[in-house]
Amino acid sequence: TAFLDILWMSLFLPMLPSIIADFWVNPSWSGYTQAVYACGMFVGGLFFWKLSDIHGRKKILSFTSIINFLSYIIMLVSIWKLTDSLGTASLVSESIDVSTSTTEVFHGFTVMFVLFLVARFVGWLGGSGFGVIQAYISDISSPQDKTKNMGLMGAAFGLAFLIGPALSGVLSQIVSIHTILILCSVIIALNVISIWIFLQEPKKHVHTEEIHLADFHFSHTVVVLLVLSCGATLAFSAVQSMSGQFYADRFHFDITQIGYTMAMVGFIAIVYQWLLIKHIRAYFNEVMMIRLAFLVLVIGFIWLALNNDRYILFFWIALFPIGMWAFNPSIGSLIAQKAGKEVGKVMWYNTSVQSIWQIFWPILAGMLYGINIGLPFLVSAGIFWILFFIALWGLS
């Protein structure tokens, strides 16, 4: 279920720059649409996890998948009359000047584009069902198996991000964007059916406790860890929100090339997680891994912004999954160790702040992109550089 839940989204991502181009809106909207998407996830996450405690995981998971299906129907209606018939990305840099003026930002803004934004918001409302999947896995896992089972879900996530973009790249050579979106809808429908047929309601629920901000009394180390976690989420959002558009504008990548590039990132993440991380961890503890991750990401983001060679590009973006997969398990492990009995509160606070950053940073990234297409990545490199020094002085 987790795999199918991510597969449809990863199929769509390589097509976003082409869709933005065919609407003839400013390319900064690649970032803004991601903000709309994140906003939907934040709103949905406030309700669906708790509703699944009350009404059952299976019912709410089915409901969020149906919402996903509805979002793609709305999206199909919004793009149905677009001119792209073979899925070949129109080059945004040739169709409209990148500008930050109000006139240019809202150039091409139509009712259909607003409908497209509505589809993105609705889609991420449904995407918040991924949190329900996490709750389901917690319900059915013994304490000793929980980490392993969560790791399997992460593996499903990585595999979907490997297969989805690659499949999108292949299909874009032979069918239209509309057909790929129909395929996404079919995948979601299959997910709904599989949930109805194969998933059973867990016999017990691990209820989430009521969180009161007034009760937060975190140690200095936990505060530093939260700053590092939220700061890294903020900085890395530049790649998540603007990378596809950047590949199209600077390197003239079409959907196929964008899809293969994203699939390569997923492949490196899987290889690193399954084959390399155990050897690296033999020499580095969690704190050292975090510092190393920030240095790797600083280098990767700077050279992504400055590089103009499409072949050298693949070397620099290979640093992103290495950096983030060095960081994420290490920060999660340290938070769990240092938070003690307040680990639930800390994790809730961390996830909430990350969700908020994922709303606002794509908006800022879109604005920076309008000034210079490499600027969002340079700013992210600066944030990672600051985080490196915080980790250097604040963690021991």
Image: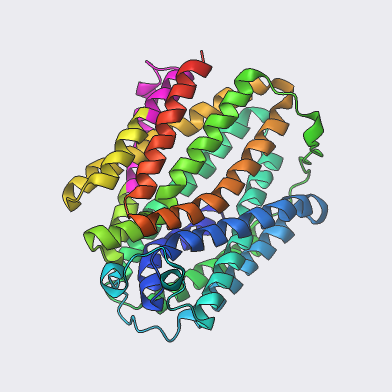
Residue 51 locus on image (x, y percent): 78, 54
Question: Residue 307, relative to residue 260: is it above or below?
Answer: above
In the picture as drawn, the residue positioned furthest to the top comes out as 396
Q: Tell me if I can see residue 266 in this picture.
A: no
Q: Tell me if I can see residue 97 in this picture.
A: yes
Q: Quadrant of residue 319?
A: top left
Q: Please give left or right for residue 194 compared with residue 295 in the image.
A: right
Number of marks in the rendered image = 0
Question: Residue 44, relative to residue 141: is it above or below?
Answer: below
Q: Is residue 269 magenta?
A: yes
Residue 307 locus on image (x, y percent): 22, 46
Question: Residue 303, relative to residue 361: is it above or below?
Answer: above
Residue 220 locus on image (x, y percent): 63, 19
Which quarter of the figure is the N terminus placed in?
Answer: bottom right
Q: What residue appears at the point 18 percent right and 45 percent down from the top-left corner? A: 312
Residue 391 locus on image (x, y percent): 48, 22
Q: What residue appears at the point 61 percent right and 57 percent down from the top-left corner? A: 39
Q: Please give left or right for residue 241 compared with residue 205 in the image.
A: left
Q: Is residue 77 magenta?
A: no
**Main SS, magenta residues:** helix
Q: Please give left or right for residue 22 compared with residue 310 in the image.
A: right
Q: What residue appears at the point 73 percent right and 26 percent down from the top-left corner? A: 342
- Of 291 and 31, which appears nearest the observer? 31
Q: Which residues are magenta?
A: 265-294
Q: What residue appears at the point 54 percent right and 70 percent down from the top-left corner? A: 117
- Of 130 and 293, which appears nearest the observer? 293
- Of 12 and 157, which appears nearest the observer? 12
